[in-house]
Structures are given as C-alpha cells and as structure tokens.
Image (spheres, rainbow, N blue to C red):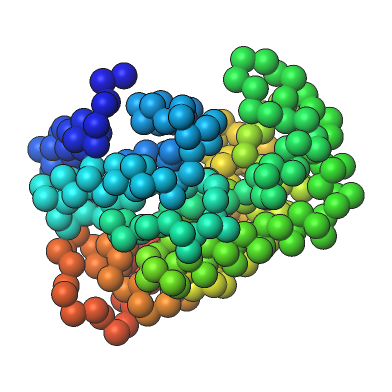
C-alpha cells in the first residue's frame, strides 16, 4: 500500500475528487470520509501503528495529527466540502478526542459491539474472515442471547446513542451514522430470523432521530437488495424513511453541508433549518 504519510492519503482523495469534479458531479457529495472506522488496522494498515496495540486509540497525538494534516490539504483544494474520519469505538472517551479538524462526526453504533463486544463474545462471533463458524454461532445463538437479555442490551445501545449525541452537542458537529444499530454482520441464509433485528433497528432509529443531532441516519447494515430478508419489508423501510426525513434537527446544525447544499459555508450561522423537503437529508 503506497500510503506512508498524511500527504499520501490526501493525494489519493484529491485524485478521486478531481475525477468527480471533472464529471460535474461534485455537488452530489454530502461529505468525504477519509478512512472507514479509523484507526483500525484492518482499514488503516498504512498507519503502521503496531506499536500502539491491536486497536490503537484515536487519542494518540500522531493519529490526531494524521487526521488534521490530510484534511487540511484537501480543504485547501475543495474548501466547500465537509470532511471526516468515521469511528466505531472509544465513544466513552470522546472528551479526550480532538475532532476540531472534522466538519461532521460519523460514528458507527451497534448493540453488538457495546461494552467491549459483550454480545459478540457471548454468542461466539469474532469477525472470522475466512471461516463461517462465526456466522454459524450468530445464527444459532444470536436471537436467544438478545431476547434473554433484552433490557441489558437495549440499555447499552441507547446509552451509546445518548453518548454520541452528547458528543455532537459538545462539538457542534452533526452526526451521520451509516452503519448501525443491532448486529454488525449477518448472512441472508434461507430461514434466517430477521424480526428481532428489524425490531431493535427500528427502535434505535426512532430513538436517535428524536435527539435532534443526526442529519443522516441509516436503518441498518443490511439495507440493500442482497439482504432479501430485510429488503422485502417495504412498509418497514417506508415508515422509517418517513420518520428520518421528518425528524427535527437542532438549529445549530444548519451550517452542515446537508442543509447548505453545495454553497460555501456562510460565516454567519443561520438561525433556522431549511424546510426538510428542500434539503439533502436522507436515509443513507
């Protein structure tokens, strides 16, 4: 991988943005996520952060500097775009994390990964890459584990939602969640139970949407036609999409690009949020 510095990462994204710009499609970009679930080695091996452990902390100075330097280069070329790095852990440490270089926050939030992967550990799922045993355990044990401890897992998930909402309020940055709410992975095998996943995801969407801090909300990790068990639930999708589009958003978030469109940031914050039918906010 030919990424050795923040400048390298910025160069790759700059090349990508120029292709999009040349095609006249730059105004379709809501924001740019420079790295999925930063700084996990699976997604960011180029950081070469082995000395920081298997899951390096985002509070490490050199990892913060990497975010700041790479975004600064992109912003010098495309200042009207919003930039971020998505995260999936350490939300309880948000007061210690410098996100001043980010324009939006993108937390990936799941019940299954709260409290140090408690659910995954109990059902025997460990993100096995080339072995179906993890999915076998998830299908066999997942529903029963959740339903037998529903109050506990719901509490952990909703506390996590509250935590990232507080992070948004403290930083003034809007939230986009594109991977979420119940379990991280599932296989659309014949006869698979989807009802418990659908139920928890729906309640999580309702709860997150009520917080006024989300400007982009996904309904799950499985919102696509390849997951027939969820894709066929048309009324479920329509109800949640309507809820997402009609949910109130706090007025301080009106400066996010979702609401200001492709225009450069106005230095005077708007006191009102545009009519939802006319902005870019959507079910991701």
Q: Position of residue 27 (x, y in %)?
A: 20, 52
Q: Position of residue 146 (x, y in %)?
A: 81, 47
> Looking at the image, which residue sits at the far top?
130
User: Toward the viewer: 183 or 113?
Assistant: 113
Q: Position of residue 279 (x, y in %)?
A: 32, 66
> Looking at the image, which residue sits at the far right?
148
Side (left or right) of 212 relative to 187 = left
Q: Quadrant of the N terminus?
A: top left
User: Going 30% across and 65% down the picture, which residue do you hit?
Assistant: 256
Q: Position of residue 151 (x, y in %)?
A: 82, 60
Q: Is residue 122 above or below residue 128?
A: below
User: Going 65% across and 53% down the picture, which residue do you hit?
Assistant: 201
User: Toward the viewer: 192 or 123?
Assistant: 123
Quarter-wise, where is residue 175 in the image?
bottom left
Q: Is residue 262 above or below residue 184?
A: below
Side (left or right) of 193 relative to 213 = right
Q: Is residue 229 above or below residue 171?
A: above
User: Toward the viewer: 217 or 154?
Assistant: 154
> Looking at the image, which residue sits at the far bottom?
271
User: Going 62% across and 15% down the picture, which residue do you hit?
Assistant: 130
Side (left or right) of 113 relative to 108 = right
């Amino acid at each position: 991988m030919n990424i050795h510095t923040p400048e390298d990462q910025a160069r790759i994204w700059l090349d990508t943005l120029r292709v999009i710009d040349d095609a006249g499609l730059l105004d379709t970009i809501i924001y740019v996520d420079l790295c999925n679930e930063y700084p996990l080695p699976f997604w960011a091996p180029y950081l070469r952060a082995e000395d920081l452990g298997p899951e390096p902390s985002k509070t490490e100075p050199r990892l913060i500097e990497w975010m700041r330097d790479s975004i600064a280069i992109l912003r010098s070329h495309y200042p009207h775009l919003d930039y971020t790095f998505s995260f999936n852990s350490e939300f309880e440490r948000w007061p210690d994390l410098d996100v001043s270089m980010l324009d939006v926050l993108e937390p990936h939030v799941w019940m299954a990964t709260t409290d140090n992967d408690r659910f995954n550990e109990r059902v025997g799922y460990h993100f096995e890459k080339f072995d179906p045993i993890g999915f076998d355990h998830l299908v066999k044990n997942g529903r029963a584990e959740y339903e037998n401890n529903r109050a506990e897992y719901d509490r952990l998930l909703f506390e996590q939602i509250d935590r990232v909402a507080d992070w948004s309020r403290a930083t003034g940055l809007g939230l986009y969640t594109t991977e979420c709410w119940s379990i991280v992975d599932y296989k659309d095998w014949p006869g698979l139970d989807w009802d418990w996943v659908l139920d928890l995801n729906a309640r999580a969407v309702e709860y997150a949407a009520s917080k006024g801090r989300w400007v982009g909300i996904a309904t799950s990790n499985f919102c696509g036609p390849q997951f027939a068990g969820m894709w066929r639930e048309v009324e479920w999708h329509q109800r949640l999409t309507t809820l997402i589009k009609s949910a109130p958003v706090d007025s301080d978030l009106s400066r996010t690009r979702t609401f200001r469109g492709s225009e450069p940031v106005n230095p005077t914050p708007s006191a009102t949020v545009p009519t939802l039918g006319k902005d870019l906010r959507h079910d991701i």
